[in-house]
Every structure is written in structure tokens, then in C-alpha cells.
Amino acid sequence: MDLTKIIKRAEAEGAQQAEVFFFEGRALRTIIESKQVKICEHKVDLGLGLRVALKKDAGYCLGFSYSTEFSNEAIEQTIKQAVNVALSKKADPDFKSFQPKKSPATVSGLYDSTILAITPENITKLGRRLLEASTSDKRIKTVRGSVGCGIGKIGIENSLGVSGNYDTTSFWVGVSVVAEEASSVGVGWGEYSNRFYNDGVIEEVASNAKKLSISQLHPKPIKGGIMDLIVTPSSEGLPDLLLYSFIQGLRADNVQKQQSPFVGKLNQQIGSQKITIIDDAHIPQALGSKPFDDEGCPTQKTVVMEKGVLTSFLHNTYTANKAGIPNTGNALRVGPFSAKPKYVLEPLIGPTNVVIKSGTITQEKLINEVKSGIITHGFIGAHTANSQSGDFSVLTTGAFKIENGEIMHPVKEAMIGGNILNILKKVELVADDVKQMPYAWYTEDATLIAPSILVRGVTITG
Amino acid sequence: MIEVFHLMEIADKAVNLAVDLGANYVDVRIEKEFSTEIRLTNERFDSAVNGIDKGIGVRVLFNGAWGFSSTCSLTGKDVKDAVENAVKAAKATSIRIKERAVLAPVPIIEDKVETPVRESLAAVGIDKKMNLALKVSGVVRDYSHKIVSANIRYEDRAGEKFVSSSEGAKVLMRPSLVRLVIMAVAREGEKITSATEPFGLHGGFEVLDWEAIKESAITAAKRAVEMLKAHPPPSGRFTVVVNPTLTGTFAHEAVGHASEADLVAAGESILQGKIGQKIGSECVTICDGSTYEKGWGFSLYDDEGVPTQKKTIIDHGVLNAYILNREAAAKLNLKPNGGARAQSYAFRPIVRMSDTYIMPGDQTFEELLEGIRRGVYVKGTRGGAVDPAKGTFQFNAEEAYLIKNGEVTTPLLDVSLSGLTLETLSNIDAVAKDLKLEPGRCGKEGQLVYAGTGGPHIRIRNAAVGGRA
């Protein structure tokens, strides 16, 4: 498709600047339900999103539209709609320009050609392996899961000379199981996602889920109170809890709208000295890695918290221009659960790979540090956290009681409530067991990479 | 109308091709949908988009195994590829299959249904919709200087959906619906509070009654400002009075999800095997299914082309029905009740709720408060989560108040409510008569669908209330 031609036509319709974003994707996945490989799905999607900037009064107005058809008429219609939206707006004095031309960053590990060759037969076979490995214990009562892979192409061009595209692949495995014994129920899960195919991971994911569910059988209630909490890197709840209570607050658009707990807190010590957090788009094979963001800005490594000091927010061209500082390359077109295709959405701001810097001690040593507390592998209700204030209230799942440095027994749900700012201040130790996890909200566009973390003195309701 | 015939022709061809390729059953959904989405913060549009989405989803059953395929292109070649991919996928699933899917029989329907519309959503310019959002934002911000922002979300969708199957079902639906979500954010010092009021109905642009919208906008602003005075809540077990919004969240999250027959059939629901059993107190009746006039999640047919019906999930405390698709109905030996829905053509239909609510009782709100020495009144919801296999839930209220000697008193901050679904159903001891349904969205297996929730004020004894650290 000739994106340059579309830009020229939009300019002819009155746009001072135009930007075309192109997305093409294919995905193949198999789903396990009711202890059975239930269905195999194949999806094809492609489309383009067009932004225009029209000069009006003292500033510019932005308009957006999209299309899945590429005939002359359809493109003409898309341009008209985008221009109409722009004309309906008041000029925005803070809009300066779309992304100027810059060389994209060099990022390795975006594309694995093995994935091109995966057939429905291959993927259902992986599904059967995942199912068999998950059910090899008689106590496993239910299994739900999926194995999938995808290929994508993203292209972007604008009036300022930005012009580029890149290809990606993805591969993911996820399973959740329920074990039952003498009317006691234990839930467990396992998950893996990467840009590259990994055959060997199937049994490992199944085994983690199985082990966790069985170890959760016959839980005991705990007495509430103020105690220590260890959070392990696990896909169930933690990425989304941090996304809602913390990462959304780092978005410069939310900060500029005064809808972030971090308004006015830049360069202040807001967390414990033990904690350093980096948004890093250059990690090989991680799902959040890419050479340029969804506006064509080269991606980078942005330290957002250095030893507890808030050092940077995440920007796109608009917020960076408004603040008069360099763009961090965090423009992201993504909807809830990534259920909407990227091309129908205007770029906002999002994380790439959020890395909580690893410590040097093992998880076991971390547990040894706890006199009385709990270790939890997951959270329920993470999405109810308040991203404007950082307040949250969640239930633990996959939690165990720790006494005198040893894991004692599984715990019936406990409730943890608080504010992320308080929690960050109370981080005492960070382990070395780093894991990469996807967000349920940003399924294929970002990851959290974190180790186990010990927080002292958290209020837990039994 | 030529366009509609064209959609039907594509569907016929796709169904025939799948059967020729060996499919034992196939259903096809073709959609062409106009939609608008506007997101406004104060006076700045974060997003204002309208566009047309179209595409086809093909679902195939081969030897009791499922395959699904979708594409956003309706050209002859791309549709043919999609059908071939769906058949290939079903054949791959069928390898070493143990339990074959069977579809419970349903009447074969040929019908055309249309939401009554006076002012077509596609014909109203986006500028008019953007102006409406601006007006609502103005009402919220004018309420008080403590309001720091108004977030307005406008959504509409209207179009054609055609469901066609190899059994002969041919259902053409023309839905049209529109929703406004009004969120007010207030701030005083370090304290930030927010309140949300949704407003949504089936129909055209005419359903957006300005007086009603204005009232919702003021309510949102008022609630956000009131909560600035809130104090941290006590934690422990209390008698709790729940407002219609949060009652709806409980009905949907804790009971509705557990009544979804795919979860029941998979052994992942606490309601498995409990039909006919008493699981709640006498005053609790919970339904799924409403009408065009009231229910945001309503549709006359589901995405398998099956007529929908009102399901009484719990009837005076007794578990009475599950929400079923055809496959789960066959597995559980029950009659399908039209509970299969998909987010769009690009997703397979799965068991979903439509509008889920607790039926009203005969008491007043004041009667519910009577005799409560120390309790908590919880209002609104910032979402919730459940584990339907374990029967646990956790909801965060948007707003809460301490109840002292039968009176609503001090506002409380960030109150959450958690518990066991079955225990809670038995602890509901009073139900008011003030039913209210609200429009929302529900996510399951990566699919978002429109769903309504609601109920009256209810009272729960001995409920676990928590706050922040």
C-alpha cells in the first residue's frame, strides 16, 4: 500500500500535517476448556488509521479516522471523516507537531520465522501436550488454557518524513487449573509469552500450574493484622495491579490532566531506596520491544524511578511538546484486552517493558527474612485499583503463610488494601528471580519484568 | 437494501462452501457496523472517532470439534480463505478428540428485527455528538470549584448483523444503541475522589434526553465532591446496605458469572449441580434478561440465532436456571435459552449475560436502615472480581457512609466489600422496591460485550468490609 499517496491526498484536503498508521496481523490459537482441546481459531485483520492536523486560529486541530478498505473511495471517505472531526474541535494550543523524522532504534529479537510455519495441526498438538501435562495428577479437576502465535506488521508514515515499518511475531502459552481433594479446592496457573517460539516451555507452564494448585489445597484462614508481604513475579494479577495503581499514573497525559498520584512528585523520593524501575523497549524477544513507537518516535530506555526517586514520566509527542522536554517514545495504540485492533485507535501513552530492577538474593533468602507474613503469587480484583489516587484493595490468590522464615500453609483469601505510594515506601528487599509477564489489559503490547519483592508492615485482613 | 442482500449472499456462499469441505455444522456471522467513540477530558478530546467495521466470522463443527476463523475483508477470495481456515482448524481440533460437542436442538428461525430508531446514529454528524459531550463536561465542572476534571465518554453503534447456519437459521438484526458515561473527579489537597454515572439506551440519537443527562452529570459531580469529606473506614464484619449499582455488580459478578453454563459444565462454578436447591434467602430472586426499553444488554436473538428469554437464575432463594448456549445445554440436558454472545464477528460466541439484576422486593430504603446500630452504606462500584470456582468475590465501592442508629452519617473512603457468594446470598435479609438498571460492559476470555446490571437497595448481614492500610 502506498502510504505516501494517502498523506499527499490528506494534505490536498487541507491537512497541514498527516500521519498514516498501518497494521496487519494474523493469529492462530487453540483453546483448552473443560479438560479438552476445544477449538482452534484463525484470525486475519488489517487496516489503517489516519490522523490529520489542521491549522485553526492560533493552533491546530487534530482529526482521526480509520478504514479496513483501501479503495480510492474508501480512502477519500476516511480523509473526509478525519478532517470533519478536526473541524469540529477548538484549536489546541499545546499541539505543536506530529513526530519529526529520526532514525529508529535498533532492537533485536522481534521476529522468529519459525512462527510462520506453525499450522493448525501444530498448534492443537501443543494444546494437547499442555492439557496432558496439566492433568497428569488425579486431583486436577478442571483445566482452562490456550496456546497461540501471531505475526504482525506495523508501518507508519507522516508529513515530516517519518517512514518505517517492522515485522513482529509472538508466541504465548497460558493455563489455569483447579485441584480438588476432599471438598477442598486449590487454584493454580502458569504462563509464558515471548516474541520467539519455545517448544520446551509447554510442560514447564503446566507443571507450575499443577504444583501451585495442589499446594493450595486445604488452606487455613489467617488472623488479620500488620505483617510482611512477599509478592512473587506471576502473571495472575500483579502486572495489572501495578498497571492500574502505578504505571497509569506515570503516563504524562494523566499527569498533565492532574489525574495521577504523581502530580508534582517528579524528582522526589516516593519509594524505598531498594527500588529502581525502568521502561525499556529494547529487551530482545520481549513483547513490549519495538524500534519506534506508534507515532514513529524511536524507542528508548527510560528510568522512571531511581532508588525510590521518581525520575521521569512516559511521554508521546503531544505531552513531550507540551512539557517542553524530549519524547520518551511511549505512544501506544491499544484498547482494553487489546480486543480492538490497533488501527482503530488514536495513539495515547503506554508502557513498553516495565522492568523492576533485580536484587541479588534468592527468593528463598527473602522468605527467610520474614518472621510473620504471607507470600502471594497472585491477586484478584487488580483492575479495580484507582489509577488517579493509587488506592487499591485486592484479594490474594495462591498465598501461603510464612512464620519464622518458613512457608507454613496455604492461606484462604486475604484482603490487602492500601495506596501504592505507601507500598513503594515499604519495599525492604528485592530478589533475583526475575520473570517476564504480560498484562491482561495490554495483552501483546507490553510486559512487566520483575522479581519477588518483600514489603514490610502491610495491613492484611484475614 | 441491496447491501443487505449482498451480506446474505456472502453468508450463503460461505455456509455452502464449509459444508462442501466436510463441515457437519457451520454458522456464519457477517456484520457491518457504524460506530462512534468520543472521549473528552474537560474541554480536550482524547479521542473522537467514527468509522465502519465489517467482517465475517465462520464457526465450523467437524466430527464434534470446533474451528473458527475471521477476517475483516468481505471479498470473495478472503471469505473463501476464511471458510477454508475454519474447516482446517476444526479438523485439527478433531485429532484425538475425546468428548464431541453436540448442539441442543432449537427452532430454526428466519427473521428480521430492528431496534426502533427516530434519529439514525449514522446520520448524526460527529460534531453534534462532540458538542453534547462538551455540554455535559461543562455541567460537571460548573458544579463546584473542587471538580478538577470531567471525563465524558460517548459511544454509539448501529448496523447490520446477519447470522446464518447450515441448519437454515437466517436472522438479520439491526441494533442501534448509545451510551454516555460521566465521570467527575474532585480534589482537595492531596485527596482525589471520583464518581461515575452511566446513561445508556437502545434506540437512535433521540434517546439522549438532555434533562436526564444533566441530572446524571450533576449527580456525578455532587457525589465526587461529597466524598472529599470521607474518612478511612472501619474494617471487620458489619450489616451493610448496598445501593442498586453495587447490587447489580454483585448480581452480575458473583451470581451471573457462576451461572454461565460453560463454567458449570466444566466444573468451574460453585453453582454446579445445585439446580432446585436453596442457595439464598427467600427474598432473593435474580434474573438475566430484560427488554429494549430498559436493558442495555438486550437483544431479541443471540449470536447462535436462538431467541433470547428472561432467565430466572435464582427464584426466591432457589437456584432455578443457568445461562446456556446450545452446546452447554446439550451437555447439561437442558433447553437452550439464548445466552451465546460474541463481541463482534471476529470472536466466537460464548456463554454471556445480558442484563443481570436482583428483582425488587416491597420495602423502602428507610426500612432497610431501621434498627442498624452500626453498619455501612455502600454505593457505586469501581468494578469487582470473582472466582466462580471458589465462590469468592471482592468489590470496591465508589462511595460509602457509616450507618449509626438507623441513620446514614459520615462518608467513608475506599470501602471494599468481599465475601463468599453463597454465604452472602443467605445473609441478604431485606430487599427494597427501588429497581434500577445501568448500562456497562463485561469482559470474559478477552471479549468485551455490552451488559446491563442492577437491582434495588439490599441489606446484607455480617458482610466483610475492608479499607486501606
Image (cartoon, helix red, strand yellow):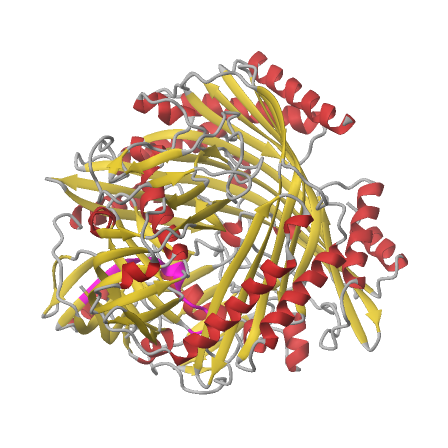
Q: Residue at x 57, y 38 (%)?
A: B344
Q: Is residue A379 magenta?
A: yes
Q: Position of residue B353 (x, y in %)?
A: 43, 39
Q: Is residue A360 left or right of residue A244?
A: left
Nearer to us in this view, B421 or B62: B421
> Which quadrant of the figure has residue A183?
top left
The C terminus of chain B is located in which quarter? bottom left
> Which quadrant of the figure has residue A448?
bottom left
Q: Position of residue B42 (x, y in %)?
A: 63, 72
Where is B252 relative to A447, above or below? above
Q: Is residue B428 magenta?
A: no
Can residue A224 be seen here? The reply is yes
Q: Position of residue B6 (x, y in %)?
A: 73, 25
Identify the magenta region: A374-389
Q: Residue at x 25, y 63 (%)?
A: B370
Q: Is residue A111 left or right of residue A376?
A: right
Q: Position of residue B323 (x, y in %)?
A: 38, 33
Q: Identify the residue at the far right of this view.
A: A12
